[in-house]
Image (tube, rainbow, N blue to C red):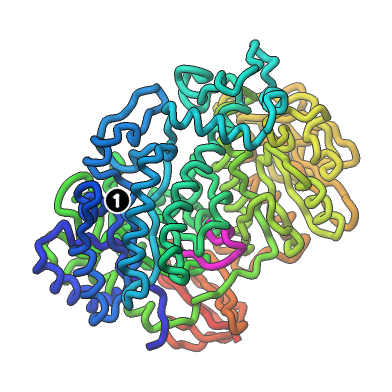
Amino acid sequence: MTPTIPYGGDYNPEQWPEQVGEEDHRLFTEARIDTLTVGVFSWSLTQPAPGAYDFTALDRVLDRAVPQGRRVCLATGTAALPPWLAKKHPEVNRTDFEGRRHRYGQRHNFCPSAPAYRDHAAALAERLAARYAGHPALLAWHVNNEYGGACYCDLCADAFRAWLRDRYATLDALNDAWCTAFWSHRYTDWDQIEPPNALTEHWRGPDHTAFQGTTLDYFRFTTDALLGCFRAEKEAIRRHDGATPVTTNFMGAYRPLDYHRWAPHLDFASWDSYPPLDAPPTRPALAHDLMRGLKDGAPFWLMEQTPSTTACRDVNPLRRPGELRLATFQAIAHGADAALYFQLRASRGACEKYHGAVIGHAGRDDTRVFREVAALGRELEALGDATLGARTPSRTALLFDWDSWWALEISDGPSRLVRYQDVVHAYYRAARTAGADVDVVPVTADLTPYDVVLAPVLHMVKGDLAARLEAVAARGGTVLATFLSGRVDLCDRAFLADVPGPLASLTGVRVDEWDARPPEVVQPVRLGESVFEARLVFEIVLPRGAEPVAVYGADFYAGTPAVTRNTYGAGEGWYVATALDQPGVDAVVRRVLARHGLVGPYAGHPAVESATRVAPDGTRLLFLLNHAPEPARLTAHAAGTDLLTGERVEAHAPLTLDPLGVVVLRVQ
């Protein structure tokens, strides 16, 4: 059988009478569903008591899948504690930011530093691996689920101190890194260090901290603590199964955890996509590209999306006809090699009973949602393996850095209203709507493949990054940095140099002052004949070799540069000193891309998204997606065959995309 994109999703038959299973599989076949994610929250079912295991329900699901030709992504089920474990070992329950030890309840409710949690979770994972390794239905291992959340208990305090000893070795080094001469904080014993929470260094929540270096390290520690839980389960699986790939499902641009630190430990990346339905299409696209960038451009799995509606928001709008198909093909266009749903059959009760599902409570196959899922399943079946393993040949990179995100948003001044993800998205959106394929990469990535590197709000500059950015420009590329970049080092200490610190030579500017104003204050910025709006932060730039591209239009710094361009070697370093509105960001980014011929042929159609993937055999696939409710009339800029219809498309011929329509063109 020809391989196809895994298609299916979360399946929880334990919530339903056993006889429903046969009907489920009939409906799965009708919808071309071939992949089931099983056991995500099954710990209390598979281990009902200490030392007692019951795999009857999982046996039934996996054994039933085989004759149906379906595969299983098998979860370890460790994301929610069973009640008996929380009762027997109360230390496994988290202590929150306010210092309260929680009682049993909810999910994602465990302390990552509790030995009882790690030991029991790893033991369960090992039991599952011993039982199901080699099972003909097994496709992948799914460890835990949507890791997240911090704990502030005494166990975490001890683990944090041990983590700090490994990082700094001496208290002198730690005191220097954290600037503890400020406010009489110099530590003389490791046991004096407390986790930064509402009872210690914070006063108005996790983002209002007196010592940013301490808080930054606790974010890093929490990332590593949860990663340690994942690694323990993966190691337990590997004792019995050395081949089946292991993953866990991420949540896109999720602030609490640095996914770049996790990436080396995943066999493939996967994530759950639940963007607000009123978000621009570049929001989920940014997250897709971030996930693709975790494994050096390798394809990822779309582990969850809703077929219709969510249930976790105050208001949960319905996906309109055609939106599910468009969102799925957008994920594939950006590197998804699987398209899975939450959930296949609706939960009978509790907080997700109204969450969208392929099959509703009545079990019907004549609903609009089921028909759309089935029609999409037939399209993916016809697509076959054409996109599997395909990569994106980008010449534009966007740097995404959790350390900069954390350091920027926990800093006092200049403005708490600057949000890292919003600024990054503005520059990503500008590049994507200009028709450029974009790799979203960590600051440690190899930058030699790229002609353009976008580095918005690169607040923290670490290691040899500045030298590698200079190398991009020196060989003829273009690097763009923005306001609030080049401010602090790895420990969140201000550089003892002119702003933008290590980026000053590349950008050719010096910033001595910056003005922060409330969002209702608008500063006009003139770029050529156009005037754009800027808000929040206005850095006052002194050119040191750079030439002005745009200037401020008001206040005492009117006429000074707001955007500059600096010749550096054979290339350029750009600096944007303020938070431009989206049209302003678009104008700047298009000028940068145009220098390298990277403005795409469909850039004049703002609702049309283009993306390219190249299959392992060299076949070039061009995706065109129309995000508008009206037809898009284009001129084809390449000849090929639409893999979804079989129709031939000639170069320079008229091409019409239906409302919310998709073309997947095998370019010839």
Query: Residue pushed farthest front?
Result: 51
Quarter where residue 140 is shown: bottom left
- Is 269 or 32 nearer to us in this picture? 269
Q: Is residue 296 left or right of residue 645?
A: right
Q: Is residue 158 left or right of residue 376?
A: right
The residue lying at 56 percent from left, 85 percent from top is 640
The residue lying at 68 percent from left, 23 percent from top is 175
Q: Quadrant of the C terminus?
A: bottom right
Above or below 240: residue 463: above
Q: Residues within 10 Å of mark 1 (few under 14, many from 20)?
A: many
Q: Position of residue 369 (x, y in %)?
A: 24, 65
Above or below 643: residue 394: above
The residue lying at 30 percent from left, 58 percent from top is 342
Above or below 318: residue 435: below
Q: Position of residue 620 (x, y in %)?
A: 59, 80
Element assignment for label 1 = loop
Amino acid, disc 1? Thr
Q: Quadrant of the N terminus?
A: bottom left
Q: Which residue is mark 1?
A: 310
Quarter where residue 92 is shown: top left
Query: Residue pushed farthest top?
Result: 184
Q: Position of residue 331 (x, y in %)?
A: 46, 64
Query: Is residue 214 part of the magenta span, yes or no?
Result: no
Q: Can the viewer see residue 659?
A: no
Above or below 450: residue 63: below
The magenta span reads 291-300
The residue lying at 60 percent from left, 46 percent from top is 424
